Image (cartoon, rainbow, N blue to C red):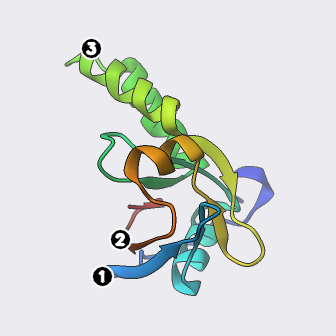
Amino acid sequence: MGENGHETKNTTPPNGSIPAKVDSDGRLQLPNNVKQYLLDSGGKKVFITSLDLCSARIYTQALWEVNKSFLSDCREDPDSAEDVLFIANDVGSDCDVDDKGRVVIPQSLRQALSLENQSVRLECFPGGVN
């Protein structure tokens, strides 16, 4: 069982650059294969953020916790890690994948990346989506 009592399956991220759209209300409609990948990777709860204010990322909660710990404990370049974590928390937010396969991009992130009512390309990675 995975986090929140959901069964975690061994999944392989969908390949390629997958088209999607953020509507005028900031909702990203996930294509079915991306939705299923996220659900299989960790359940309905995700963390949506940016690490660089150039692209958005959707993390499963479990992967975000790992990344947050890594950034908090980084000894190689703690100042840069602290800056990245600050940005991620400043523009990021927890979200649920709804029954229709949509997630709401946090308003501060939508504004920073001009994502409202825009076509986007999704690329999956282990535990999340760029």
The amino acid marked with disc number 2 is: Glu
Give residue 129's position: percent from left, percent from top. 43, 63
Q: How far separated are the C-alphas under marks 3 and 2?
A: 29 Å
The amino acid marked with disc number 3 is: Asp
For residue 39, above or below residue 49 = below
In percent of the image, x 77 and y 52: which residue is there? 4
For residue 83, above or below residue 98 = above
Do the CB atoms of the residues marked 1 and 2 lie less than 8 Å apart? yes
Which residue is disc 3 drawn over? 79
Tell me which corner region of the image, top left, top right, bottom left or bottom right, holds residue 74: top left
Q: Can you name the residue that lies furthest to the bottom here?
A: 32
Disc 2 secondary structure class: loop
- Mark 3 closeness class: few <14, some 14–19, many ≥20 residues within 10 Å: few
- Nearer-the-camera pick, 51 or 75: 51
Q: How far separated are the C-alphas under marks 3 and 1?
A: 34 Å
Which residue is disc 1 drawn over? 16
Disc 1 secondary structure class: loop
> Can the viewer see residue 28?
yes
Sooner in the amino-acid sequence: mark 1 or mark 2 = 1
Give residue 65's position: percent from left, percent from top. 54, 37
- Mark 2 closeness class: few <14, some 14–19, many ≥20 residues within 10 Å: some
The amino acid marked with disc number 1 is: Gly
> Can the viewer see residue 49?
no
Do the CB atoms of the residues marked 3 and 2 lie less than 8 Å apart? no
Which residue is disc 2 drawn over? 123
Disc 3 secondary structure class: helix
Tell me which corner region of the image, top left, top right, bottom left or bottom right, holds residue 67: top left
